[in-house]
Amino acid sequence: MTARIIQKLRVVGVEDSTPEVRVYTLEHPRKPLLPAWAAGAHVDVRVADAKVRQYSLCGEPGVQKRWQIAVKREAAGRGGSAWMHETLALGGEAMVSAPRNNFPLAPATRHVLVAGGIGVTPLLAMARTLAAEGADFTLHFCARSAALAPLLAELRAVCGPRLVTWFADEGRRFDAALIGPPAPGTHLYACGPQRLTDAVRAAAEAAGWAEPQQHYEVFQPTLDENFKPEPFELKLASTGEVLLVPADRSALEVLRERGFALPSSCELGVCGSCVCGYSEGVVIHRDSVLPVAARQDRMTLCVSRARVAVTVAL
């Protein structure tokens, strides 16, 4: 069972932001308003063969009449973006979930935003919110060139001088060390290729940023070529029943087989839709979505495992 698809939306706008990135504007064909959302939220879109992909909302967070998503065609991807570019046209319809937010803005006196390529989509929504509130922020935007920088015109209009661009073809490459030490009340956000978010994370930790001040969003699974999954046990809190999770299967699969109709979407540990509470046990967290504080009592069933039998809140 995939994450609940709640509505069929109509494509009322299609615009190419770059040769690789297409912006879709979506409205409900009958209802005047869509569910409210906040900057950092994403939606699930059903693509070919009932597969689901996640796309950040990048329009105006306060506008409920329409949603906007930007989709980069990934030649080496899993086929979802190619389907979107080739199939979803003006007047077409898409099955879309309610927004879910694993990357919200935190209360802060200053915000530092770092985006790489298509990773700018949630940060554009953040910039819209912060600009409307008159908040103190800077957005660093990294891309190969201005011509290949998604949503650049919108960013310039929203951010003005608070936008700092780093285009490789101009010889300007972002150095994560520029983040510097954390000022009181400042929060850091980064979204983009793993090499960028890894560099930002390393620089932030070296400069003394506390974990709660750092916020990251990725849409690629955590890679660990040396990880070898082993079988482990799940205990159901409601009944005390113990289930064995084989090395070649996930907790999500085993629980579904046992009859639990659990939601999921990416099944890669990046969307958060299958997160479940737990108590006892030693969990091996292999997701890219849960912050450190949440990992004390929550786990992502599609990818995380355990060293010691874990009791799940089911």
Image (spheres, rainbow, N blue to C red):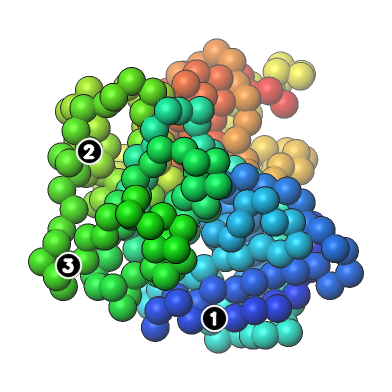
Residue at which label 3 appears: 168
- SS label for mark 3: helix
Residue at which label 2 appears: 179
Label 2 CA crowd tier, 10 Å (few <14, some 14–19, many 20+): some
The residue at 21%/27% (across/down) is: 181
Question: In the picture shown, does residue 118 fall above or below 203?
Answer: below
Question: In the picture shown, does residue 146 fall above or below 195?
Answer: below
Q: Which mark is residue 215?
A: none
Across and down, in percent, residue 94 comes to 71, 72
The residue at 15%/58% (across/down) is: 173
Q: Which mark is residue 15?
A: 1
The residue at 54%/30% (across/down) is: 299
Label 3 CA crowd tier, 10 Å (few <14, some 14–19, many 20+): some
Whole-number angstrom distance, CA of label 3 to CA of label 1 = 25 Å
- SS label for mark 1: strand
Across and down, in percent, residue 134 comes to 50, 41
Residue most extreme to the right? 30
Across and down, in percent, residue 38 comes to 62, 45
* Left-right relation of 5 to 205: right
- Residue 204 at least partly seen: yes
